[in-house]
Amino acid sequence: MSSTMRAFVLTGPRECSVQEVPVPRAVAGEVVVDVERAGVCGTDVEFFTGAMAYLHQGHSAYPMRLGHEWAGTVTEVGEGVDPAWLGRRVMGDTMLGDRTCRRCRRGHQHTCERRQEVGIRGGRAGALAERLAVPAWSLHALPDPVDAVLGALVEPGGNALRAARATGAGAGDRALVLGPGTIGLLTAMFLRAAGAEVHLLGVDSLDFARGLGFAHTWTRETLPGAPFDAVVDATGAAGSPALAVELVEPAGRVVYIGLSGQPSSLDTRALVLKDVTAVGVLSGSPGLAETIAAYASGAVDPRPLVAATVGLGDVGAVLAGEWIGGAGPKVHIDPRR
């Protein structure tokens, strides 16, 4: 086996290349995975442009290897790892807590102060490479119906599932999702699966969302005055948090999963006077297993979100917004290409 592999390396803002790097080895407690698919995310774009807050907070630094939405097959196990993992098709949690702090012990390892994040934080190399090393405890096995395409959509799906669940919306409820990007559309899919009447609000063409069967799609100018029992902000717009509170029904719920590049302004008096419950969602970690089950059963099918699958050599163009593919919001990378 070769001692090197191909990986996408980001060396500075808008500076990147595909390089030959050392093949990872499975140290104690970890496995090595042959990566079959990896998704490109808005977080990756922020690292590419240099806008990502972690770069300025000391949590991340160039050079770095991106990629936190992935699926593949375990090909090597380290000391202390069950050999039954060998040959298993898997995806993995992005958030790697230290497993010893109070938050981790209480089941909130995704909020661990000392956490690593695969392809994001703490120097943990990501999945935009031919192989990836991760702790065995972070793995989730993928059943046969969940192929590599779906497997690489589990991580964003976990975020969306948590956002949908946080609304409390179900049959008889009307939910509005702000932002029809990957997370917004996935959240809409999970809300629809829960029986809610789903509406989507965007700023331009919503034809793609309509093609997914979402008939209630609006711009700010066309949005009807119907009462919304829950509103999910899946945008990156600084004004959306306040808009969500404005649009939600009294005693309703607003869920925040989008992050703006600048501080948002929200008058908490509106929350109090409307008796609104507000929830923030950081990570898909607590929802990964349920997301895999939803994909496996067919309750949610996110395949149409993937516009195309390209190779490592195309990642730079995708991050720069220069690559033009299909209508879907998500691009997948096959590192074997």
Image: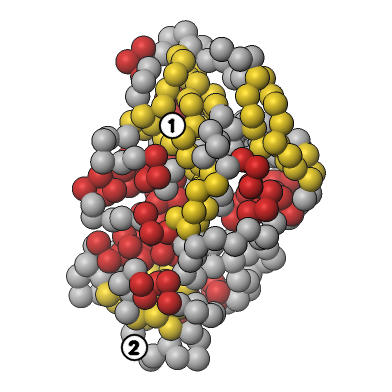
User: Residue 21: horizontal and vertical position, in percent?
Assistant: 69, 24
Query: In this picture, is 211 found above or below 318?
Result: below
Residue at image point 78% right, 39% down: 11
- Tag of residue 72: 1
Asked whether the viewer can see residue 202, the reply is yes
| Residue 201 sits in quarter | bottom left
Residue at image point 59% right, 66% down: 236
Query: In this picture, is 239 found above or below 132?
Result: below
Task: Report, in whole angstroms, how far the alpha carbon at label 2 lies from the one at label 1.
Answer: 44 Å
Quadrant where the N terminus is found in the figure: top right
Quadrant where the C terminus is found in the figure: top right
Relative to 295, 265 lies left or right: right
**The disc labelled 2 sits on which kind of residue?**
Ala
Residue at image point 43% right, 88% down: 223
Residue nearest the observer in this picture, 305 or 286: 305
Asked whether the viewer can see residue 252, the reply is no
Count of numbered labels shown in the rendering: 2
Please rate how many residues cluster around mark 2, counting C-alpha atoms within 10 Å: few if below 14, some from 14 to 19, many from 20. Answer: few
Relative to 236, 61 lies left or right: right
Residue nearest the observer in this picture, 195 or 86: 86
Q: Read off the residue under disc 2.
A: 226
User: Residue 163: horizontal and vertical position, in percent?
Assistant: 40, 59
User: Residue 264: horizontal and vertical position, in percent?
Assistant: 63, 69
Query: In this picture, is 72 found above or below 218?
Result: above
